[in-house]
Amino acid sequence: MSGLHLKDLSKRFGNFTAVDDVDLTVPHGTFVCMLGPSGCGKTTLLRMIAGLEEPLAGAILLDDEDMTPVPTHKRNLGMVFQSLALFPHLTVGENIAYPLRIRGVDKNGQRKRVEELLALVHLPGYAARPVSKLSGGQRQRVAIARALALSPRLFLLDEPLSALDAKLREAMQVELRQLQQKLGITTIVVTHDQREAMTMADLVVVMGEGRIRQAASPIEIYRKPADAFVADFIGSTNLLEVKADRAGRAITLGQPIAGLSLPEGMARGLVSIRPEDVHLAGSANGAFRGKVTFVRDLGGTIETFVEVGGTTIVAVTTPRERGDIEAGTEVGVTLPAESCVVLKQ
Amino acid sequence: MRREPPRTIADYTPLAFPAIMLIIFFVVPFSTMIAVSFFRRQQGGFYTPDFVIDNYGRFLSAFFGGVLGFSLMLAIMVAVICVAIAFPFTYLLTKTSRRVQIVWLVCLLSVLSLSEVIIGFAWSTLFSRTAGITNLLVAAGLMSEPQALLPGFGAVLTGMVYQALPYTILVLYPALVRLDPTLLEAARTLGASPLRGFINIIVPALRNTIVATLIMVFVFALGSYLLPQILGRPQHWTLSVLITDQAIYQSNMPFAAAMAVFLVLISLALVGLTLLVGGRREATA
């Protein structure tokens, strides 16, 4: 099968298990985002794919070829580091030409390829500049161009955009995605920013404590999180404890959620419901009654914090679909069954 | 933090103490030496104030030229060998665990606590025929009979490299420890073997540090005076030995001063030249 296959990879540092029995198949040309909190093993996994760390067990297969024993410099991959690792003593052009120089490409070929790559990352004419004179976004582009110089089989990026300010980061996310689609290259990005993952990825891999918690398309991860960890990490969510009554109906906060029942054999669990799926009714005629404790009006969206039986439920609405609800008012809260995801506790 | 240029005299007061120290312990003695180098020598030991340039004229002779050339060559060799050994060593040291690094650094510091005399005599024992390292080689069957490895140029060079190496490592260490470890990793992902990445990324990235270290070791080795006498033959004596000989045993202060001033000027010129070449390469890079 063409693509990348990680087979039961594990890695330990002393007593700490960084990556625990990870198994993943990435079809050729896929954009993968590894997402997780710091220390979840995502960077270690990326470094193992790059050959910078040796796995304790398992194998890395690229197009059915075992890469595990191949040293980094023979794997033909492009990697962008968090620090970018631009060579400070070389110019932009020399940085990008470095891999070409090592492969013995002649001067003319080097210059042509450098110009091509600079055009690709929208920095034409920058070849002669010293790296130290570039802005953060420009350095980013140079690092990307350098990593792509040899048309690698795999494009790896370790928190590539974390040093940029929010606006530039969002623009670069779009650009990176478009670049990847243009080149059709299998790409793996490590990030802790779920917006970044949602923007760019075909496949989001959520990691926690060294294991893959869920690997699926961004919208599936968002809509159907596999467990409470994923639901909580991707976007914000309301997690409510539920238990089943004798008829199997889901009971939370002392009341059933209309139309929702727990799967057979599940006595208690969690319900995840996204804030934008929570409905508020100004007159207190919903299923749950609560008191508004805080309103965060962000202009485009309004977050309303409602306390129901000692638990805070957050609802997000746009200003248009919402009447005047102020802190202190009593409201009715409806949790539509079709938006609720039942998770194991 | 905002820094304003000093305006009043009071703003300069923090500089007063170092300035006074520099004047008392450096400017005054050095000026005195420059002055003495132009004085006229009296037969019998002393000298009278005067302005003669004979003292400088004297070492235009082939003998002093030879000694000067040898001193500079020796110092340059020591500097190059020290940096060539210390740079890869220190780089590998920074890759080890914190505890290993501390043990190594403490050992290196303890070498610094040895005086030049002890280092000299230790090496003269190690290089001797009766108790030296050649006896080990004989015991190992690599040599037929023990040999004396001193006095000789190799012995002088070894002793001086041994003495200067801890300094070299300690000067290189901070720069190498701060070096971004992903530079080499990046080179590896771009197709360079670790050795190749080290040679064409790590070394050039630290070019300024390397040049500064070369200069430091060069200046350090140029002042060496004891080791060439303990481990070398008279032809391996440096200008520092001759200066001491003139100043103390021949009681020719003006000539000794002139040689010292000349040595300082030559080393300053070499250092300046190195910086100039380095700076020019920086500009074209």
Image (cartoon, coloured by chain):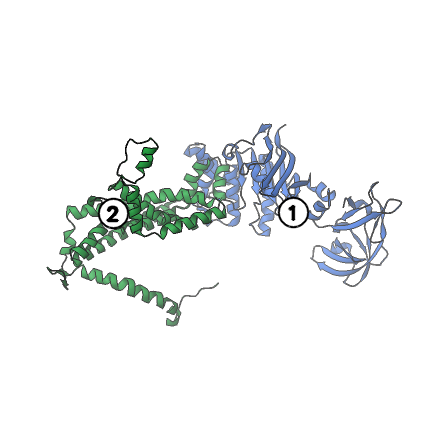
Q: Which chain gets the green colouring?
A: B
Residue A195 badge: 1
- Residue A187 position, x and y percent, is 59, 37
Please give the residue where the numbered disc 2 appears in the rendered image. Answer: B230
Camera-nearest residue between A138 and B69: B69
Residue B148 appears anywhere in the view: yes
Residue B37 badge: none
Say whether mark 1 and mark 2 are on the same chain.
no
Circles 2 and 1: CB distance less than 8 Å? no
- Dot 1: chain letter: A
- Residue B98 position, x and y percent, is 49, 48
Camera-nearest residue between A190 and A246: A246
Up-down relation of residue A3 to residue A310 (above or below): above
Q: Is residue A299 left or right of residue A51?
A: right
Residue B271 appears anywhere in the view: no
Question: Could you tell me the amino acid type at mark 1?
Answer: Arg
* Circle 1 Cα neighbour tier, 10 Å, few/some/many (<14 / 14–19 / ≥20): some
Up-down relation of residue B241 to residue B187 (above or below): below
Camera-nearest residue between B205 and B24: B24
Mark 2–mark 1 Cα distance, whole angstroms, equals 72 Å
* Circle 2 Cα neighbour tier, 10 Å, few/some/many (<14 / 14–19 / ≥20): many
Q: Which chain gets the blue colouring?
A: A
Q: At 32% from the left edge and 65% from the top edge, which residue is drawn?
A: B21
Q: At 22% from the left edge and 55% from the top edge, which residue is drawn?
A: B260
Q: Is residue B69 left or right of residue A298?
A: left
- Dot 2: chain letter: B
Q: Is residue B245 left or right of residue A300?
A: left
Question: Could you tell me the amino acid type at mark 2?
Answer: Ile
- Residue B46 position, x and y percent, is 14, 62
